[in-house]
Image (tube, rainbow, N blue to C red):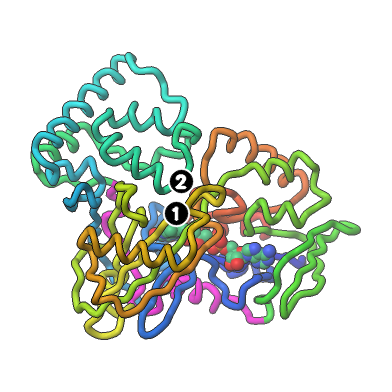
Amino acid sequence: MEKVGVLGGGISGLSFASFVTGAEVLEKEETFGGLLRSVKEKGYTFDLGSHIIFSKNSEVLKFVLDLLGENKICHKRNTKIFYKGRTVKYPFENGLGDLPKDEAYECVVDYCETYIKREKGELRQPKNFKEWMYYRFGTAITEKYLYPYNERVWDYPTQMMDTFWVEGRVPQPPLKDVIKAGMGLETEGYTHQLNFYYPKVGGFQAISDGVKSRIDNDRLINNFEVEKVSKEDGKWVVKGKGKNGGERKYDRLVSTVHLRDFFEAYKDAPVEVREAARNLKWNSIYLVMIGLDNPKINDIHWAYIPDSDVLPNRISFPSNLSPQTVPDRHSSVLAEITFNPDGEKAKLKENEVVERTVEDLDRIGVIKRDEVDFTKLIKCKYAYVVYDLEYQKNIKIIEDFAKKDDLVLLGRFSEFRYYNSDKCIESAMEKAKMFE
Ligand SMILES: Cc1cc2nc3c(=O)[nH]c(=O)nc-3n(C[C@H](O)[C@H](O)[C@H](O)COP(=O)(O)OP(=O)(O)OC[C@H]3O[C@@H](n4cnc5c(N)ncnc54)[C@H](O)[C@@H]3O)c2cc1C
């Protein structure tokens, strides 16, 4: 049987190995799961960022729900935007009725005028993400919410981001819905995510644990940090450090680790390919986990914060996703601060991040400081892929090379796409077919 090496044991690597029986997974950490791991401490369970289960792909959704069996809860989304002291329904365009009347009117008129101009071909095609927001939503919605929020979540200038990816990722409502919303009538946007699931017990790690349980233990090597990849006599040679480090040889190789790290390890790859990988943009995230001595903080699942005076750009409420993620009569908040690794926020000290988060959330009335019962900070180096204007050029150089080199790239940071876990599983299903 062909021996297949899989670098990285997140949901992508694990799913692939669950479909391909000859595959062995090398994972640098003690625990498998990557971003689909959950922190369990003092009766609290927190994920590495707010995670929910939804998918347009029914096969993938079934795969995940079957893994969980009875261990799941179905929710109807209750998500907000904290805007100037108000809670506005998400997506913002569907929540215009929650704004003061004059602001709602401004948004609706602007949206309609922009719509007409666009239909008449009077607007220049957008050249970047910032221009796209104005082109698609008009000035008012863009300047009140979309632009400030997106500048925060990417921590990268939106005029230096491409637009090819926005379809399906940035909610785009029909004209009628925006008018209805402005009049305070009920509308829903981004509907494929309106109903979603969450594990009852174990946080999102229940999913990666479920996939892992389908793989024989002898094919799961943890504490193996890949440091060097090369090709010798038609075989892939992988060298790594860590408790289980050493040298392993494979007939075929699948990588799910960040492209930049992979091509640092694969020194025989052409210079232009390694350079392209180095030029890719991505961001990192601080996750501030807060436990509260409060039996019911609110009924919101998660909320977006466009206001740059508040450190977190998004917060979620794990205790509202499953009551089993908190001790009895407690609540929890998970605050996300995404940051550019070369930017100002990267310089913040960890205690400062926690302190400012608690202070800011107390100030805007989300939590009460004296109810805080637990805090923990986790910093994840890789959170989001950033589609800068050079992205398509760089990724093509890498993909063309990978195809010629019989190297399979899989997952969020190796295909380098804004994938949720469902897309990682879908891609693993597709790529597994190449090994049948
Ligand atoms: C804030 C946030 C919110 C999200 N929300 C959702 C959501 O609501 N729903 C959803 O479905 N998805 C969500 N996602 C996306 C989801 O987390 C990812 O798509 C998915 O976990 C990516 O899995 P992966 O296996 O491709 O990558 P990773 O999880 O990054 O796995 C890569 C693995 O490789 C290992 N590794 C790295 N370097 C090496 C090395 N040198 N040697 C060996 N091993 C190595 C890592 O330790 C890791 O285990 C969210 C992500 C973020 C950041």
- Disc 1 secondary structure class: strand
Label 1: which residue? 338
Residue 108: quadrant of the picture:
top left
Residue name at image x 32 percent, y 30 percent: 136
Closer-to-camera residue (37/209): 37
Q: Of the residues shown, which amino acid type is indicated by label 1?
A: Thr
Q: On the rendered image, what quadrant is the C terminus found in?
A: bottom right
The image shows residue 165, relative to residue 134, as above or below, that is below
- Tell me which segment is drawn in magenta: 190-217
Image spot of residue 249 (x, y percent): 81, 67
| Mark 1 C-beta closer than 8 Å to ligand 1 | yes
- Percent coordinates x, y for residue 231 in the rendering: 85, 57
User: According to the image, label 2 marks what residue?
Assistant: 155
Is residue 404 in view from this perspective? yes
What distance separates the C-alpha of mark 2 from that of mark 1? 7 Å
Return the x and y of residue 388 as percentages of the image width and height: 54, 37
Q: Is residue 266 left or right of residue 79?
A: right
